[in-house]
Image (cartoon, helix red, strand yellow):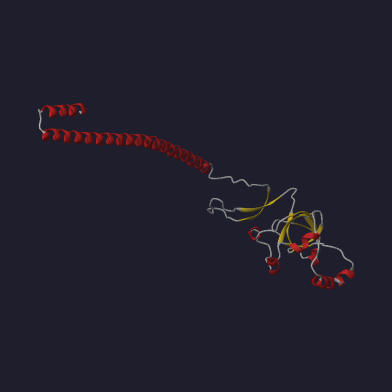
Amino acid sequence: MHDNLASYDKYLSDGLITKDQYNYQHSLYFQQQSTYQSLVSQKMQLESQVTQLNSDKITKTADFDNQISSQENQINDYKNQLVESSANGNIIIKATTEGRIESLAVTKGQMVDKGSSLAQIKPTGDIEYYLILWLPNNSIPYVKPGDIINIRYDAFPADKFGQFPGKILSISSVPTSRQEMSEYTNVTDGTNQQELALYKTIVKIENKSFEYNGKTLSLSNGLKAQAVVFLEERPLYMWMFTPVYKITQSITGPIND
Protein backbone atom coordinates (compact mmCIF):
# COMPACT_ATOMS: atom_id res chain seq x y z
CA MET A 1 0.00 0.00 0.00
CA HIS A 2 2.85 2.35 0.80
CA ASP A 3 4.50 1.53 -2.58
CA ASN A 4 1.28 2.37 -4.41
CA LEU A 5 1.15 5.70 -2.60
CA ALA A 6 4.71 6.43 -3.76
CA SER A 7 3.63 5.72 -7.35
CA TYR A 8 1.04 8.48 -7.09
CA ASP A 9 3.84 10.93 -6.36
CA LYS A 10 5.36 10.04 -9.75
CA TYR A 11 1.99 10.22 -11.48
CA LEU A 12 1.44 13.70 -10.06
CA SER A 13 4.86 14.91 -11.21
CA ASP A 14 4.22 13.47 -14.72
CA GLY A 15 0.82 15.19 -14.85
CA LEU A 16 -1.09 11.95 -15.13
CA ILE A 17 -3.37 12.75 -12.15
CA THR A 18 -4.75 15.91 -10.62
CA LYS A 19 -3.91 17.32 -7.22
CA ASP A 20 -7.37 16.39 -5.92
CA GLN A 21 -6.87 12.78 -6.99
CA TYR A 22 -3.50 12.73 -5.29
CA ASN A 23 -4.94 14.13 -2.02
CA TYR A 24 -7.81 11.65 -2.14
CA GLN A 25 -5.40 8.71 -2.40
CA HIS A 26 -3.37 10.05 0.53
CA SER A 27 -6.53 10.43 2.65
CA LEU A 28 -7.64 6.92 1.71
CA TYR A 29 -4.21 5.55 2.68
CA PHE A 30 -4.30 7.09 6.15
CA GLN A 31 -7.87 5.86 6.75
CA GLN A 32 -6.84 2.33 5.84
CA GLN A 33 -3.74 2.63 8.02
CA SER A 34 -5.89 3.73 10.99
CA THR A 35 -8.30 0.85 10.38
CA TYR A 36 -5.39 -1.59 10.31
CA GLN A 37 -3.98 -0.32 13.62
CA SER A 38 -7.43 -0.58 15.20
CA LEU A 39 -7.75 -4.20 14.05
CA VAL A 40 -4.29 -5.01 15.42
CA SER A 41 -5.26 -3.50 18.79
CA GLN A 42 -8.52 -5.48 18.86
CA LYS A 43 -6.58 -8.66 18.06
CA MET A 44 -4.23 -8.07 21.00
CA GLN A 45 -7.16 -7.45 23.34
CA LEU A 46 -8.89 -10.63 22.19
CA GLU A 47 -5.69 -12.64 22.65
CA SER A 48 -5.34 -11.22 26.18
CA GLN A 49 -8.94 -12.16 26.96
CA VAL A 50 -8.36 -15.69 25.65
CA THR A 51 -5.28 -16.03 27.89
CA GLN A 52 -7.23 -14.78 30.92
CA LEU A 53 -10.12 -17.14 30.19
CA ASN A 54 -7.74 -20.09 29.93
CA SER A 55 -6.18 -19.11 33.28
CA ASP A 56 -9.63 -18.77 34.88
CA LYS A 57 -10.57 -22.14 33.45
CA ILE A 58 -7.57 -23.80 35.10
CA THR A 59 -8.24 -22.03 38.43
CA LYS A 60 -11.94 -22.88 38.41
CA THR A 61 -11.14 -26.49 37.55
CA ALA A 62 -8.83 -26.75 40.57
CA ASP A 63 -11.43 -25.08 42.82
CA PHE A 64 -14.15 -27.46 41.66
CA ASP A 65 -11.84 -30.44 42.22
CA ASN A 66 -11.12 -29.26 45.76
CA GLN A 67 -14.81 -28.74 46.47
CA ILE A 68 -15.62 -32.19 45.13
CA SER A 69 -12.88 -33.74 47.28
CA SER A 70 -14.09 -31.85 50.35
CA GLN A 71 -17.69 -32.93 49.76
CA GLU A 72 -16.59 -36.54 49.33
CA ASN A 73 -14.64 -36.41 52.61
CA GLN A 74 -17.64 -34.90 54.37
CA ILE A 75 -19.88 -37.62 52.97
CA ASN A 76 -17.46 -40.26 54.26
CA ASP A 77 -17.47 -38.62 57.70
CA TYR A 78 -21.26 -38.67 57.76
CA LYS A 79 -21.22 -42.31 56.76
CA ASN A 80 -18.80 -43.14 59.57
CA GLN A 81 -20.94 -41.23 62.07
CA LEU A 82 -24.01 -43.05 60.82
CA VAL A 83 -22.27 -46.41 61.25
CA GLU A 84 -21.15 -45.49 64.78
CA SER A 85 -24.59 -44.25 65.81
CA SER A 86 -26.24 -47.32 64.31
CA ALA A 87 -24.00 -49.74 66.21
CA ASN A 88 -26.45 -50.86 68.89
CA GLY A 89 -27.51 -47.22 69.27
CA ASN A 90 -24.57 -46.50 71.62
CA ILE A 91 -21.58 -44.20 71.44
CA ILE A 92 -18.60 -44.68 73.74
CA ILE A 93 -17.14 -41.46 75.13
CA LYS A 94 -13.69 -41.93 76.61
CA ALA A 95 -12.50 -39.87 79.57
CA THR A 96 -9.21 -38.01 79.31
CA THR A 97 -7.97 -39.46 82.60
CA GLU A 98 -8.57 -42.38 84.91
CA GLY A 99 -10.66 -41.70 87.97
CA ARG A 100 -13.97 -41.99 89.73
CA ILE A 101 -17.15 -40.23 88.65
CA GLU A 102 -18.18 -37.78 91.35
CA SER A 103 -21.23 -36.23 89.66
CA LEU A 104 -23.20 -36.49 86.42
CA ALA A 105 -24.33 -33.41 84.53
CA VAL A 106 -26.82 -35.26 82.27
CA THR A 107 -29.65 -37.75 82.60
CA LYS A 108 -30.58 -40.80 80.53
CA GLY A 109 -32.10 -39.84 77.18
CA GLN A 110 -30.99 -36.21 77.39
CA MET A 111 -29.67 -34.57 74.22
CA VAL A 112 -26.17 -33.09 74.53
CA ASP A 113 -24.18 -30.74 72.34
CA LYS A 114 -20.62 -31.15 71.17
CA GLY A 115 -18.20 -30.02 73.89
CA SER A 116 -20.76 -30.25 76.70
CA SER A 117 -19.62 -31.34 80.16
CA LEU A 118 -21.08 -34.75 80.96
CA ALA A 119 -19.54 -35.60 84.32
CA GLN A 120 -16.94 -34.63 86.88
CA ILE A 121 -14.19 -37.19 87.43
CA LYS A 122 -11.92 -37.30 90.45
CA PRO A 123 -8.53 -38.74 89.51
CA THR A 124 -7.42 -41.85 91.37
CA GLY A 125 -3.99 -43.23 92.10
CA ASP A 126 -0.89 -41.34 93.18
CA ILE A 127 -2.00 -37.72 92.74
CA GLU A 128 0.08 -34.66 93.52
CA TYR A 129 -1.79 -31.56 94.69
CA TYR A 130 -0.36 -28.06 94.53
CA LEU A 131 -1.54 -24.82 96.08
CA ILE A 132 -1.40 -21.59 94.08
CA LEU A 133 -0.54 -18.83 96.53
CA TRP A 134 -0.47 -15.08 95.84
CA LEU A 135 2.23 -13.34 97.85
CA PRO A 136 2.24 -9.53 98.23
CA ASN A 137 5.36 -7.70 97.16
CA ASN A 138 6.31 -6.70 100.72
CA SER A 139 6.81 -10.38 101.64
CA ILE A 140 8.98 -11.39 98.66
CA PRO A 141 12.35 -10.46 100.29
CA TYR A 142 11.69 -12.85 103.17
CA VAL A 143 10.55 -16.03 101.40
CA LYS A 144 12.29 -18.42 99.03
CA PRO A 145 11.72 -21.83 97.44
CA GLY A 146 12.05 -24.59 100.00
CA ASP A 147 10.43 -22.63 102.85
CA ILE A 148 7.71 -24.38 104.85
CA ILE A 149 4.33 -22.67 105.31
CA ASN A 150 1.14 -23.52 107.20
CA ILE A 151 -2.04 -24.04 105.18
CA ARG A 152 -5.61 -23.53 106.39
CA TYR A 153 -8.39 -24.85 104.17
CA ASP A 154 -11.73 -23.05 104.23
CA ALA A 155 -13.46 -26.42 103.87
CA PHE A 156 -11.66 -27.70 106.97
CA PRO A 157 -11.67 -24.96 109.65
CA ALA A 158 -8.36 -24.69 111.47
CA ASP A 159 -10.00 -24.70 114.91
CA LYS A 160 -11.19 -28.28 114.27
CA PHE A 161 -8.81 -29.74 111.72
CA GLY A 162 -5.67 -27.74 112.47
CA GLN A 163 -3.12 -26.49 109.97
CA PHE A 164 -1.36 -28.44 107.25
CA PRO A 165 2.25 -28.15 106.06
CA GLY A 166 3.26 -27.04 102.59
CA LYS A 167 6.56 -26.44 100.83
CA ILE A 168 7.22 -23.54 98.46
CA LEU A 169 8.40 -24.86 95.10
CA SER A 170 8.65 -21.68 93.03
CA ILE A 171 8.00 -17.94 93.20
CA SER A 172 7.31 -15.84 90.12
CA SER A 173 9.95 -13.21 89.39
CA VAL A 174 7.39 -10.72 88.02
CA PRO A 175 4.06 -9.54 89.43
CA THR A 176 0.98 -11.38 88.27
CA SER A 177 -1.25 -9.59 85.77
CA ARG A 178 -4.93 -8.96 86.49
CA GLN A 179 -5.80 -11.02 83.42
CA GLU A 180 -4.08 -14.11 84.84
CA MET A 181 -5.70 -13.64 88.25
CA SER A 182 -9.13 -13.34 86.64
CA GLU A 183 -8.74 -16.94 85.44
CA TYR A 184 -8.88 -18.13 89.07
CA THR A 185 -12.45 -17.78 90.28
CA ASN A 186 -11.66 -18.58 93.92
CA VAL A 187 -9.17 -15.73 94.46
CA THR A 188 -10.28 -13.18 97.03
CA ASP A 189 -10.07 -9.75 95.38
CA GLY A 190 -9.89 -7.46 98.40
CA THR A 191 -8.89 -3.81 98.61
CA ASN A 192 -5.44 -4.58 100.00
CA GLN A 193 -4.74 -7.00 97.16
CA GLN A 194 -5.67 -4.39 94.59
CA GLU A 195 -3.13 -1.98 96.07
CA LEU A 196 -0.25 -4.48 96.31
CA ALA A 197 1.54 -6.30 93.51
CA LEU A 198 1.02 -10.05 93.88
CA TYR A 199 3.47 -12.80 92.94
CA LYS A 200 2.32 -16.26 91.92
CA THR A 201 3.77 -18.96 94.18
CA ILE A 202 3.47 -22.73 93.74
CA VAL A 203 3.29 -24.72 96.98
CA LYS A 204 3.53 -28.50 97.23
CA ILE A 205 0.97 -29.97 99.61
CA GLU A 206 2.51 -32.56 101.90
CA ASN A 207 -0.66 -34.23 103.24
CA LYS A 208 -3.24 -35.25 100.63
CA SER A 209 -5.51 -36.91 103.21
CA PHE A 210 -5.96 -36.88 106.97
CA GLU A 211 -7.96 -38.57 109.71
CA TYR A 212 -10.79 -36.93 111.63
CA ASN A 213 -13.02 -38.78 114.10
CA GLY A 214 -12.00 -42.10 112.61
CA LYS A 215 -12.84 -40.94 109.08
CA THR A 216 -10.37 -40.42 106.25
CA LEU A 217 -10.81 -37.10 104.46
CA SER A 218 -9.10 -36.37 101.14
CA LEU A 219 -8.26 -33.16 99.34
CA SER A 220 -9.72 -32.34 95.93
CA ASN A 221 -9.26 -29.80 93.18
CA GLY A 222 -10.65 -26.29 93.62
CA LEU A 223 -10.31 -26.01 97.40
CA LYS A 224 -9.82 -22.51 98.73
CA ALA A 225 -7.13 -21.98 101.36
CA GLN A 226 -5.17 -19.42 103.32
CA ALA A 227 -1.51 -19.68 104.24
CA VAL A 228 0.67 -18.54 107.11
CA VAL A 229 4.06 -17.52 105.71
CA PHE A 230 6.99 -17.07 108.07
CA LEU A 231 8.83 -13.94 107.01
CA GLU A 232 11.63 -13.07 109.46
CA GLU A 233 12.58 -13.60 113.07
CA ARG A 234 13.40 -10.63 115.32
CA PRO A 235 13.98 -10.24 119.02
CA LEU A 236 11.02 -8.74 120.83
CA TYR A 237 12.85 -5.47 121.53
CA MET A 238 13.36 -4.90 117.75
CA TRP A 239 9.63 -5.15 117.14
CA MET A 240 9.09 -2.65 119.95
CA PHE A 241 11.48 -0.16 118.34
CA THR A 242 10.13 -0.55 114.78
CA PRO A 243 8.19 2.78 114.93
CA VAL A 244 11.40 4.53 116.05
CA TYR A 245 13.31 3.07 113.09
CA LYS A 246 10.65 4.35 110.70
CA ILE A 247 10.81 7.86 112.17
CA THR A 248 14.63 7.84 111.98
CA GLN A 249 14.53 6.82 108.31
CA SER A 250 12.01 9.56 107.57
CA ILE A 251 14.16 12.38 108.98
CA THR A 252 17.49 11.08 107.63
CA GLY A 253 18.96 13.12 104.78
CA PRO A 254 19.95 11.87 101.33
CA ILE A 255 22.05 8.71 101.22
CA ASN A 256 25.41 9.15 99.50
CA ASP A 257 26.94 6.09 97.88
Q: Where's residue 3, x and y in %?
A: 20, 26
Quadrant, the N terminus: top left
Quadrant, the C terminus: bottom right
- Measured along the vertical axis of the image, is residue 98 above or below residue 48? below
- Image quadrant assignment for residue 184: bottom right
Q: Where's residue 28, x and y in %?
A: 16, 34
Going 31% across and 34% down the picture, which residue do you hit?
47
Q: Where's residue 203, x and y in %?
A: 76, 55
- Measured along the vertical axis of the image, is residue 155 above or below residue 169? below
| Of residues 73 and 12, the one drawn nearer to the viewer in this rendering | 12
How many discs mark residues in the rendered view? 0
Question: Relative to residue 127, is residue 87 drawn left or right?
Answer: left
Question: Relative to residue 170, is residue 49 drawn left or right?
Answer: left
Going 14% across and 35% down the picture, which residue do you hit?
23
Going 74% across and 62% down the picture, which residue do you hit?
137
| Of residues 94 and 247, the one drawn nearer to the viewer in this rendering | 247
| Of residues 174 and 63, the one drawn nearer to the viewer in this rendering | 174
- Image quadrant assignment for residue 44: top left
Would residue 141 be visible to someone looking at this image?
A: yes
- Measured along the vertical axis of the image, is residue 214 above or below residue 253? above
Q: Where's residue 100, x and y in %?
A: 68, 51
- Image quadrant assignment for residue 26: top left
Would residue 212 be visible to someone looking at this image?
A: no
Going 15% across and 28% down the picture, which residue do you hit?
8
